[in-house]
Every structure is written in C-alpha cells, then in structure tokens.
Amino acid sequence: MKKLKRSARLVEMTQYLLTRPHTLISLTAFADRYQSAKSSISEDLAIIKEVFEDEGLGELQTHAGAAGGVKYTPKMNRDQALSIIQDVCRQLEQPERVLPGGYLYMTDMLGQPGLLADVGRMFATAFASSDIDVIMTVETKGIPLAYATAACMNLPVVIVRRDNKVTEGSAVSINYVSGSNKRIQTMSLARRALREQSRVLIIDDFMKAGGTIQGMMDLLYEFNATVAGVGVFVESAEVGTEERLLEDYVSLANLTEVDMKTKQTAIRPGNFFG
Amino acid sequence: MKKLKRSARLVEMTQYLLTRPHTLISLTAFADRYQSAKSSISEDLAIIKEVFEDEGLGELQTHAGAAGGVKYTPKMNRDQALSIIQDVCRQLEQPERVLPGGYLYMTDMLGQPGLLADVGRMFATAFASSDIDVIMTVETKGIPLAYATAACMNLPVVIVRRDNKVTEGSAVSINYVSGSNKRIQTMSLARRALREQSRVLIIDDFMKAGGTIQGMMDLLYEFNATVAGVGVFVESAEVGTEERLLEDYVSLANLTEVDMKTKQTAIRPGNFFG
C-alpha cells in the first residue's frame, strides 16, 4: 500500500477494523501496512476508539507493549437496541401476521439486511464475553440471524438440517419432540461439520416451548460439544413457564399474547433488555 | 451527535457509508449530522472516495448540486477477486471433498463469514449496474451467499422452500425436474414473499445442468416477476454444454473434472473472470 496522509490513513484503518471484528491486529502489522511509526498508529487508534465508543459502535481494545495490538468488538448500546426492537414489536403486531397455530409471519423481516445486521449486533453484544467457537442454527429461518451474528463475532456457522442431504456426507441424526405440538421430528448434522469439544452458541428465530433448541442440545451431546449460549429473536410466552424446556437463553422480543380469533397479538422487548 | 473534529468526522463518515451501501445520502443529511458546512463534507468525501477507489473497496459516486448526495457501491477489483477464488479452488480440490454423485463438500466454506463477505462482494460487483429489487435463493446452502450479496447491495432476500411450512401462510408450489438426475422435485414460495413485477437476482451455491435455477425461474413466472440475473458460486462443467438449461449466468468457480475413483477434481475460476 502506498504511504497515506493521516486523514486517508484514518479512513483506511476504520474500514480495515470494521471488516475484521473480534480479530487481534498487532500494531506492527498496522505500522507495516501504513509505513508509519507505531506512535502515529496509536494516535490514530485513539481517535477511532473515541468515535466508536461515543457512537455506540462497539469497543476498540488496545493492548500496549511490544506484543500489543488492537481488537474491535462490535456492540450496540441498550438505547439504540431498544428503539430498534420496539419498532420490530410494532411491526410484528400487525394483525395480518398471525398464522394458523399461533405462529407469526416474520419471514419478510428476516429478509431485510439492515435489520439483520442490527439483530446480529445485538446478539454479538449479549455474547461478547462468552467463549464461543462456532454458531449453530437449524434450517431455515434461523440461518440469516446466525450469519448476521457470526459476521459480527467472526465465527463460523454450522446449520442443522431437517433432512439428510447427499451433499453433506455421513451425518448424525436425532429424533426430538417439538415441545409445543408434541410431534416427533428429526434433525441431523454432518459428521465433519463440527469438531469435538466445540463451544457452541445456538441462534434461532422463534422459541415456543424450546423443543427444537433442546433437540440441538441433544445433537451437540453426540458431538461431545457444549452449549455456550442460546439466543432467540422472538420467544413466545404463550406456553406456561413450567412447560418451557429451557431456562437460560437471551430473547430480543417476547410474544406475550396471541388471540387467534381477533388476530390481536401483544409483543414486548425480550429478556435481553432485563 | 456532538460536533466532531475533521479526523473524528472522517472515521464516523467512513463507518456510516460502509454500513449503508447502495443508499443515496444527501450532503444536507451529512451537513446536519456533523453540524458542518457542505464544503467541508465534500472535502471529506473526496478523501474517502480516493481511499476506497485506490484500495479497491468500491465506488463513491457523488452527485453535485442542491439535490446532490453520495452513494457507496461496494466492489472488488479483479485481481483481489481472482486471488481469493484461486485459493477457494485449491481448497475445493482436496480429495476428501468428493461426495457420492459428483458433489463436492463445501458446507464448511459456506460457513466462514470472511469468505462469504468476499463472495457477496464479487456478486455485488458482477451485478452492480443491474436493476434489481430482490435476491432469491433456494434453501439451504445458497442462503448465506444470498444474504452476503444482499448485504452489499442493500436488497431484501426471499427464500424458496423445498417444503411448504405452516409458518409462511399460503404459498405457490411448482414441480421441476432436476437436470442432472432427472428427478421430479417440488419448490414453493409464500404468496406474500414476493411482489408482482419484481426484478429478481437468483443466487445459488452449485449448478450442474441448471434444473433448480430453471425451477426458480418457472416459479418467478407464477409471480409475474422477471429474472434480472443469475449468480452461482460453483458451476459444474461435467454436464455437456448442450445439456445445460441455462446460458446467461455468472459463476465464480468451475468444476471441470471429477474422477469418482481417484477422488481427483479440477476446479478453475468461473466465467466471472472471463
């Protein structure tokens, strides 16, 4: 790279950090990249850190010393997150979203890249200090949320299938009971998709009694992997809490009431907001 | 937002533009946001533009005048893209990736957020000047590629299902013949997922004869929508060109040879590279 002026270097460093979250970059690497003294790089990083933290974009952790470096951790502050989720709740309360079985149509919202980026950042905030190797979801609607979170956390994604496709090689399958409708279902994961001992963050779009997520946990057991966290976009509080299979999870929104006759629903921010 | 010094403003503007691709932002909006004169904003944008274009991050189009503004179009230059795809080809040639039926195991690569962001940027480059309303894919493995492309192009995603799930409402289903193995299969899309007259970019992970993509095109016909482009990550040239159902598409890699006995494959960069 050609030698840049400070103003241009700030632009380049900002994009470099933003596109490499949760990655330790040494001051030496920056100094080489920009052909500049480490002291100048440190001053630039101080400016970037102040802007990122003032604007609630996340943290820039700098480690001093010869082995020092900098790591960008994307986060979203509580007020920003709450305002986005309140808007999500308003949209989800539209009567035409109520589907048979007490489900909500939200596929359109899970197709919006802007909202997905925000939601990924919220999950990344919730699990920023957890020790996680990989993010897992089950097809299909949890997939964009899992990838949005993975992009913020710089982690790989594995997708649990509801069938066993030829293009995945040998797989482990389990049966599980969907908690809300008590039906037996199957899910499977390719043998080579997940290393033993992995610490796994489970992300899904919707949780009623938690049977699907419990199924993913059972599957992890078969891989000698452990659950490092569970995040759901919308939980449904319709099931009594005594029926819920799962206690420790983060939800962004909580569907507290569905009236199938009037198509009225009530949705409020989830336990992420305390 | 508090008033920032130029150096801090450059950092903030860079992140603001990077997180809002393909969006026209007026100079007035920037001037208000930073409580600065439009002339200062224009100078800042000139610096950002030069860095983005020198480093191959994309284009910053500025429109002068009272109604003027700026739009960031993420792109990747050919050399960068080629170097990434050559590395992808090397990884895909590993013998243990060959699966029964001449498929390649590439799910692990489609789980890497860094590679996905790069591939999304390549498709965004290929279709930057096309008029597109929405990106479509079919579950499951095309989904991360579709979202990565959508994030760069600021477009919504619709996912065609291989079943007809209760949580989608009424849907249109079609049967199609998979071109390579001649089996009849079904795909469906929720009625409310796609507006009539939409111009659709189809993205998928793998194409042999093109039957699945032809199926998506047939489905689009039912919605009075049109195909604005087709992008595939890997095409397989194993099928004779006379058998290919589809002629106009962009591929990033081309699987030219699979020897099931020796597990040897040959993969080279696709037609994106000319």
Image (spheres, coloured by chain):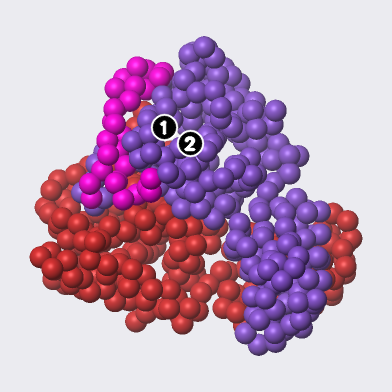
Chain colours: A purple, B red
- Taking B19 as reference, is B104 left or right? left
Give the Cα distance between marks 2 and 1: 7 Å
| Secondary structure at numbered mark 1 | helix
Badge 2 is on which residue? A227
Question: From where the camera sits, is residue B221 visible?
Answer: no
**Labels 2 & 1 near each other (Cβ < 8 A):** yes
Question: Which chain does the numbered disc 1 sit on?
Answer: A
Find residue A217 and name its label. 1
Answer whether residue A180 is magenta in the image.
Answer: yes
Total marks placed:
2
- Taking A53 as reference, is A230 left or right? left
Image coordinates of residue B185 in percent, x first then y, are 19, 44
Question: Where is A116 relative to B116, above or below?
Answer: above
- Taking A269 as reference, is A176 left or right? left
Residue B213, image quadrant: bottom left
Task: Pick the quarter of the image with the C terminus of chain A.
Answer: top right
Q: Which residues are magenta?
A: A169-196
